Image: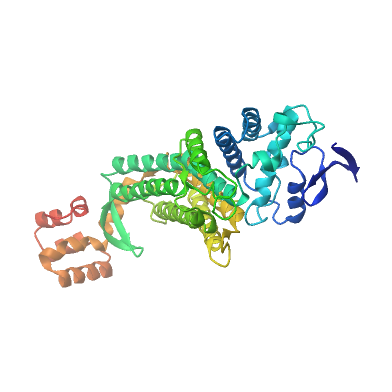
Amino acid sequence: MTTVINSASNETRIEKDSMGEMPVPADVLYGASTQRAVLNFPVSGNPVPEPMIHAFAQLKIATAQANQKLGKLSDSKAKAIVDACTQIQAGLKDRGGITRHFPIDIFQTGSGTSTNMNTNEVVSNLVCIANGAPVGSSKNTAYLEGDRAVHPNDHVNMGQSSNDTFPTAMHIAAAVAIKESLLPAVSRMAKDLDSKAKAWDDVVKIGRTHLQDATPIRLGQEFSGYASQMHHAEERLHRALHTLGELAIGGTAVGTGINTHPRFSELVSANLTDATGIHFREASNHFEAQHAKDGIVEVSGLLKTIAVSLSKIANDIRWLGSGPRCGIGELKLPAVQPGSSIMPGKVNPVICEAVVMGACQVIGNDTAVTCGGMGGVGSLLDLNVAMPMMAANVLESIKILTGSCQIFTDNLLTDLEPDRERCNALIEGSLAMCTSLVPVIGYDASSKLAYQAYAEGKTVRELALELGVVDAEKLNSLLDPMSMTSPME
């Protein structure tokens, strides 16, 4: 029988696991194993991210259905597990939310055993409630027996080990977040940049290399480069989905598949594919899938690359919008909030700054993930023991990149405009205009002309006309900015 006692001011119940009795808060759905982890790992105060819990619930549904099909789990037990996991996926809002029942810190046992058992216990206790039995009575035949009893280890965890469930849940959580959140945000940003590239293809401006004046370029060409970066980001995310599609489930403890059916992984992968629309498949080598975390390291690296792309785009746009009067000023950035508590009328490129900061965090997350995958740090012989940290960082990176793309598109790109007059004024005054004279008068003469124009405060056009370098008609043709933005015939 489940015993409820009062400990200090908090009501608790006594639960048992393989190590003995453990007081557990009376209102939670987890059991003794989870409570031990709560007490053992008060490190950061940050629990395992909710997407991981949702992924675990999805995985437990898929494993129950697979075991049912294999004849290892009765129809009623499988249904009970599925129903309980469905409640977890719905957020357990009527019971205080996910975090109340999944409180274990990210920095826990490196295999994620605590979170796997947390899931097993919550599922088992939800089945108890569904059967009208007290929470914690899944092992008590006085309340539950036969098909009504769902044991956290024997049934919810059937054919599984923490060592293959946690890496599988990592892949599910990251893949779902990319498919449902990040990829749509990246695609929408790419589409907006494409439209800007087309709309502004007639705006000629000065190019800049080394932050110094260079030959002319069309604003549309610059933005086509940004759009291409985001299209490459889309491709990288599709590669990430392919990598994440390979699952460790079925390897159990060390990759050998002990205590599971040979078809288990195949069936679980098919169930997950049907549920998510993402192509999941059994790992080609279960020993690689469990002993190393190269796939997660690869995905984190792809996310880092996207962060670098975003930082480039955001930084370029804040430079091009600098001013409004004493900077480059070729772009008019939308004013989204006052920029200073002391300087009236000042507006700052805050969206760009937020995106760049987000990129910095993603790069830092990737460093942590990389370390977690390293031999001698996380990857030790037959298991990686840094998985919760790696999962949390990858999921945070996906979340940051998703939010960055969304605010960049909604709060900056949508109302971004070029300052055509400023572009024209700067390009006419650029000394790099003399580059188009090189094929006619040679490099040395063109260089001398540029230096003299700079010294005398004149434009290249003005000085060339004054010196009679070429006739006026020919000069106007050579110094046509638009013609300089395409390859010469």
Residue 445 falls in image quadrant: bottom left
Relative to 24, is 152 on the left or the right? left
Asked if residue 207 is positioned above or below residue 191 in the image, the reply reads below
Residue 348 seen in this snapshot: no
Residue 447 falls in image quadrant: bottom left
Query: Which residue is rendered at x = 75% and y = 50% of the image?
Result: 38
Q: Position of residue 39 (x, y in %)?
A: 77, 53
Residue 52 seen in this snapshot: yes
Query: Which quarter of the rendered picture does the C terminus lie within?
Result: bottom left
Q: In terms of depth relative to the viewer, which is nearer, 460 or 306?
A: 306
Query: Which residue is rendered at x = 60% and y = 44% of the image?
Result: 159
Q: How is the image coloured?
A: rainbow
Q: In terms of depth relative to the viewer, which is nearer, 385 or 325?
A: 385
Q: Position of residue 455 (x, y in %)?
A: 27, 70
Q: How many marks?
A: 0
Q: In terms of depth relative to the viewer, which is nearer, 62 or 107?
A: 62
Q: Position of residue 280 (x, y in %)?
A: 46, 42
Residue 427 falls in image quadrant: bottom left
Q: In terms of depth relative to the viewer, which is nearer, 315 or 163?
A: 163
Query: Which quarter of the rendered picture does the N terminus lie within?
Result: top right
